């Protein structure tokens, strides 16, 4: 099972977020999670087909975590993001929690 986490982070703080993620968050996330990857958008505009998106547009941060099952995920999430170490890291996220204008987690399985 894969958890795809998409975030829309405030564009005016995006570069500061990328620096924070590289300098502080990624080492912890890689150690505590089976992190498949962590991506941030390039300045190229998204290519959208079909119905128009809302005013935020597409996510500008995406990361994927591999889990054996939902029960393991739920148990881990209750601890990984509540540790004193993570709280110390997260206190420095640019603009705080309100800078995440949208957070989405969706759960997928590989079929091929």
Image: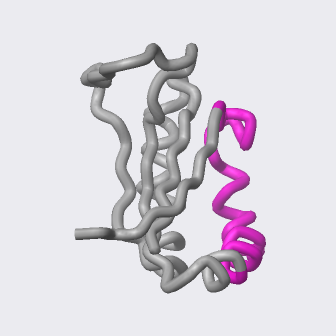
- Residue drawn at x 54%, y 34% is 8
Q: Quadrant of residue 89?
A: bottom right
Q: Quadrant of residue 81?
A: bottom right
- Residue drawn at x 48%, y 32% is 14
In reply to whether residue 91 is colored magenta, the answer given is yes
Q: Is residue 96 left or right of residue 29?
A: right
Q: Which one is nearer the viewer's eye here, 59 or 87? A: 59
Q: Which one is nearer the viewer's eye here, 44 or 18? A: 44
Q: Position of residue 107 (x, y in %)?
A: 52, 62
Q: Position of residue 87 (x, y in %)?
A: 74, 64
Q: Relative to 19, say whether 86 is above or below.
A: below
Q: Position of residue 18 (x, y in %)?
A: 44, 43
> How many marks on residues?
0
Q: Which one is nearer the viewer's eye here, 61 or 91? A: 61
- Residue drawn at x 31%, y 24% is 46
Q: Position of residue 90 (x, y in %)?
A: 67, 56
Q: Quadrant of residue 48?
A: top left
Range drawn in magenta: 75-101
Q: Quadrant of the C terminus?
A: bottom left
Q: Relative to 98, say whether 21 is above or below.
A: below
In reply to whether residue 108 is colored magenta, the answer given is no
- Residue drawn at x 71%, y 82% is 75
């Amino acid at each position: 099972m894969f958890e795809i986490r998409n975030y829309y982070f405030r564009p005016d703080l995006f570069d500061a977020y990328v620096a924070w993620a590289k300098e502080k968050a990624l080492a912890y996330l890689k150690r505590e999670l089976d992190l498949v990857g962590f991506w941030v958008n390039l300045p190229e505009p998204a290519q959208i087909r079909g119905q128009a998106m809302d005013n935020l547009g597409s996510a500008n941060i995406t990361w994927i975590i591999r889990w054996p099952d939902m029960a393991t995920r739920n148990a881990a999430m209750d601890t990984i993001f509540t540790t004193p170490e993570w709280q110390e890291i997260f206190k420095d996220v640019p603009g705080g929690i309100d800078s995440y204008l949208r957070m989405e987690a969706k759960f997928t399985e590989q079929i091929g």
